[in-house]
Amino acid sequence: QVQLVESGGGLVQPGGSLRLSCKASGFTLDDYFIGWFRQAPGKEREGVFCMSSNIGGTYYLDSVKGRFTASRDNAKNMMYLQMNSLKPEDTAVYYCAVRPINIYFQRLRDACREYSYWGQGTQVAVSS
């Protein structure tokens, strides 16, 4: 059974840090592109980090560049999102997601498409 389970969310003060984790089970993470998305109240879901292809096609949402870093540990079937210098506007439910590596895009602007497996989400709240 394919499953993604996020953890690490919570309440943090502005300027603080959080690291989200996502445990994959039922499949080998190495065979998938990873992605992180978020959805704030009343807003559409947006891609925070996405991958278009294996040849350097990585996308970060402009507002998180330099503050957020996505990573993976294929040996542990884990993916992570390190979030630093958090701002109130980062408040959202964060989701991890994966897309099979046989579905790839040449254009970086397509990087957040076709993610097929999703976690249940973890709440991140940034407030003083």
Image (cartoon, rainbow, N blue to C red):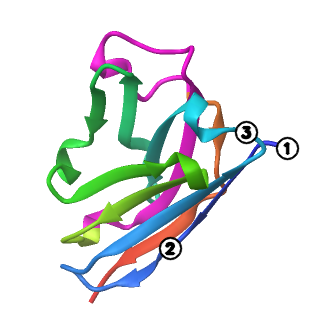
| Spot occupied by residue 22 in the image (x, y as percentages of width and height) | 56, 58
**Range drawn in magenta:** 89-114
40 magenta-colored: no
* Helix, strand or loop status at disc 2: loop
How far, Cα to Cα, is label 2 from label 3? 22 Å
How far, Cα to Cα, is label 3 from label 1? 8 Å
| Spot occupied by residue 60 in the image (x, y as percentages of width and height) | 26, 41
| Spot occupied by residue 29 in the image (x, y as percentages of width and height) | 60, 40
Q: Choose the circle earlier in sequence order: 3 or 1.
A: 1
Figure check: 50 above or below 37? above
Report the disc number at residue 1.
Answer: 1
Whether residue 45 can be seen here: no
* Helix, strand or loop status at disc 1: loop
Q: Residues within 10 Å of mark 3 (few under 14, many from 20)?
A: few
Which dot, 3 or 1, sits closer to the camera? 3
Q: Residues within 10 Å of mark 2 (few under 14, many from 20)?
A: some
The residue beneath circle 2 is: 8
Report the disc number at residue 31.
Answer: none
User: At 36% from the left edge and 74% from the top edge, which residue is drawn?
Assistant: 18
The residue beneath circle 3 is: 27
| Spot occupied by residue 9 in the image (x, y as percentages of width and height) | 49, 73
Whether residue 83 can be seen here: yes
Q: Choose the circle earlier in sequence order: 1 or 2.
A: 1
